[in-house]
Image (cartoon, helix red, strand yellow):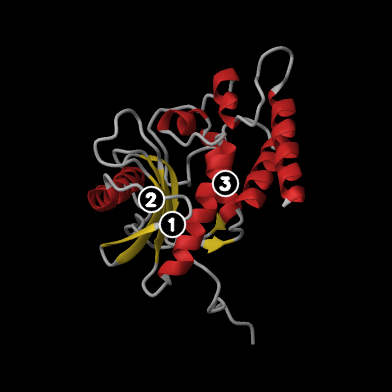
Amino acid sequence: MASSALPLLLPKVDAILVLDGDGNRLAGKYYGEFMKTPTATNGADAAADNAATAQSVEQLRNSFERQLQSKIGGISAKSDAAEVVNVLGKTAVFCGGSPAGHGGGGDVRVVHVGPAGESELVLAHLAEGMYDALSQLMGGSTDRAMVLDNLELVFLLIDEHCDGGIILETDGQKLAGSVLLRDEQEPRAGHGMEGHGGGMPGHKPAMQSGGMGGLGMGMGMGGDMTIGQALLQARNQIMANLNQT
């Protein structure tokens, strides 16, 4: 008889969030029933009910994120030493962030929210792997402006890292390489924020010369280099680094 139960050792998360220094969600995704309200039933006012439900879900998530920010604000977690906090009975592990009193936009935080009973060490490993990949994709500069300019890559990173709350890959270099390869192959028509838990309202990823410069790795978007060529060059450099290790 087939079983729908997940293997006991398969890592699972309830949410992945990329937050700026003020706790604003730049990108992220919620999984399962975490931070959801019952869906509206069909009826004459179904459209209005659905709109109200969507609004209430977003309000619920914003409230959770504010409580999360109250715990992690002003804490800087190294890329290889994630910090752990508890919020509403959930374990939240994060990397990144700027120390209290740090000026400017500061470093973003990659947060993994785990279900009750999930190992803190496992969650820390997940957060560190994704943060490492994000840092590589952003050319080592994981500040708010850089992330906003490259949101499409961030959403692709979340998808490569996790599917339906189930972790697919944790190695930073492999994740970054997969994201660049997938971004090269897929159409660039808005990797929509719908279904991803949302990003900054009204913001459109600036995947042009300034934004792609965030990939760093010694390349520029000047001259006749296309976005596809820039992505291919970056991917080849990452793969070369992989082969050297």
Q: Compare residues 161 and 202 and report the one nearer the observer.
A: 161
- Number of the label disc, if any, that sits on residue 81: 1
Up the image or down, 121 lies above or below 155; here it is below
Residue 48 % position (x, y):
31, 43
Residue 97 % position (x, y):
36, 43
Up the image or down, 67 lies above or below 139; here it is below
Residue 142 % position (x, y):
47, 37
Query: Upstream in the sequence, badge 3 or badge 1?
Result: 1
**C-beta proximity under 8 Å, tags 2 and 1:** yes
Residue occupying image coordinates x 57% and y 34%: 139
Amino acid at pointer 1: Ala
Query: Upstream in the sequence, badge 2 or badge 3?
Result: 2
Q: Quadrant of the N terminus?
A: bottom right
Q: Compare residues 122 and 207 and report the one nearer the observer.
A: 122
Q: Compare residues 21 and 2 and report the one nearer the observer.
A: 21
Q: Residues within 10 Å of mark 3 (few under 14, many from 20)?
A: many
User: What residue is disc 2 on?
Assistant: 77
User: What residue is disc 3 on?
Assistant: 133
Residue occupying image coordinates x 74% and y 44%: 239
